Image (cartoon, helix red, strand yellow):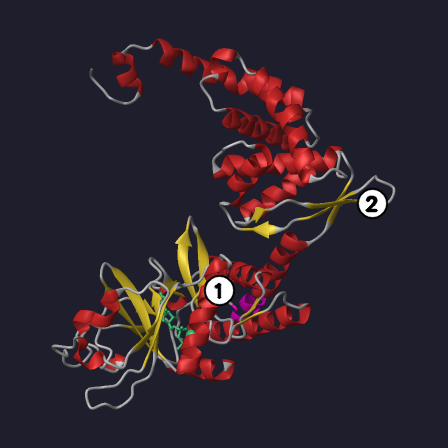
Amino acid sequence: MTDTARANWRNEPTDWEQAGKLPRPHEGSGARSLGSLDVTSASMDPALLDLPWQVPLEEWPTDRLAALPRGISRHVVRFARLGDSLIAIKETGEHIARHEYHMLRKLRRLNVPCVAPVAVITGRTDEQGEPLDPVLVTRHLRFSLPYRAVFSQTLRQNTLTRLIDAQALLLVRLHLAGFYWGDVSLSNTLFRRDAGAFAAYLVDAETGELYPELSGGQREYDLEIARVNIAGELMDLAEGNLIEESVDPLATSERIMDSYRNLWRELTEQETFAPGERWRVDARIRRLNDLGFDVDELAIRTTADGTQVQLQPKVVDAGHHQRRLLRLTGLDAQENQARRLLNDMDSYRADNHPELDEELSAHLWVTQVFQPIVRAMPQELGSKLEPAEVVHEVLEHRWYMSEEQNRNVPMAEAVQSYMDNILRHRRDEAAILLTADTKTMKILGGGGNG
Ligand SMILES: Nc1ncnc2c1ncn2[C@@H]1O[C@H](COP(=O)(O)OP(=O)(O)O)[C@@H](O)[C@H]1O
Ligand SMILES: [Mg+2]
């Protein structure tokens, strides 16, 4: 399959849909010839039925289509308007369409970045009653670019590197979810710009399979496919003078291996700490957060002589922390606050009583860490800031202090420093706001000449 795919993308240019390129509009499509259509869809949009399914996709009228950049593919793929949104339509075999539809649904549920499936439509016939290929409909991924469109100008090594890192991260996420891709390539990935980097999404799940867990061999095999495909894709770009001359396609394709393996290690490796090295637990969690992962409770085990703490992060999707914090402590916080508080709660447990179960440890954390911080705050300010936010800020502050000084700064010291260095300024602000008249308030709020 991979070979076929490669043979195809090597021959075809990037297909930017040209307005006017497609033949005659088909008038009066409508429901008449729709009798035998079979639509599989979780949330059926009736507007789907208004599309001209009795026409081969290549002949769809241009007024139905959206001219957006598209990657290289072996099937006919087009973008069309559906109400206010855009969909991607791929003509393919029934088995493939169904397999891909269900695969994408599962991947979405597992929170892996991929395109969203909309429907599988079979039973298409043209106006003469001849059968037409079934289609897979997905929601068009907004702001996404196929990799060749990322290179509208000659691509610099730097950009290329970030693109490949994004691809590596996507592969890691898929593998963590138990997905074996089987056809990893830049062509089967969509990229979105993300604060100077790229975020990668899976677009083609045709060859993929989900397993409870992947073996090391399966992961390595997928990685090898990625390397070979990417090397081919880059050589292709080099031939078309689309990448900087100094870029070595083979060496660059190797980068996916290192990038992937580093990420995998960071996400899954067991680490051992001495109790009291809490800041190192925090550091690990922060690195994972920076990679875009949230960390569920840490699996914590003490070694036989009780001097070491082992840490194995469980990686989860966002949104989860708020619920977990609420369940464990009854505290209602924003997601980021909750994540920070839970991180602290977990390292507190690792540090103090790894043998306790998490409910009991959470209770101790509330009474011994959370509440004392809240109580330490000057009263007039305590009433102005949410307790969860105060504690969150103190923990942040402590983290920066610990990192700067390369030691585990005690909580009391961090609280004092927070009050002296951060809160003092805050307090002034609050004082102004508390005594300000409307005119001052307006000026403070940028309201101008009151
Ligand atoms: N939902 C979508 N959003 C944006 N682009 C899409 C979407 N689905 C397909 N495409 C575009 O169509 C191209 C081909 O799709 P793909 O599923 O890889 O087809 P094939 O199975 O023929 O290789 C992709 O590279 C991408 O550019
Ligand atoms: Mg493809």
Residue 2 seen in render: yes
Estimate how packed mark 1 is, as few (under 14), some (14 to 19) or many (20 or more) residues with alpha carbons within 10 Å.
Answer: some
Compared to residue 201, the image places residue 237 above or below, namely below
Camera-side residue of 25 and 192: 25
The residue positioned 42% from the left and 15% from the top of the image is 430
- What residue is shown with label 1? 106
Q: Is residue 148 magenta?
A: no
Corner quadrant of residue 26: bottom left
Percent coordinates x, y for residue 119 in the rendering: 35, 70
Q: Secondary structure at mark 2?
A: loop
Residue located farthest toward the right when viewing the structure as drawn: 305
Q: Is residue 130 above or below residue 422?
A: below
* Helix, strand or loop for the magenta stretch, by majority: helix
Q: Which residues are magenta?
A: 248-255
Q: Residues within 10 Å of mark 2 (few under 14, many from 20)?
A: few
In the picture, measured across the screen, residue 162 lies left or right of residue 178, that is: left
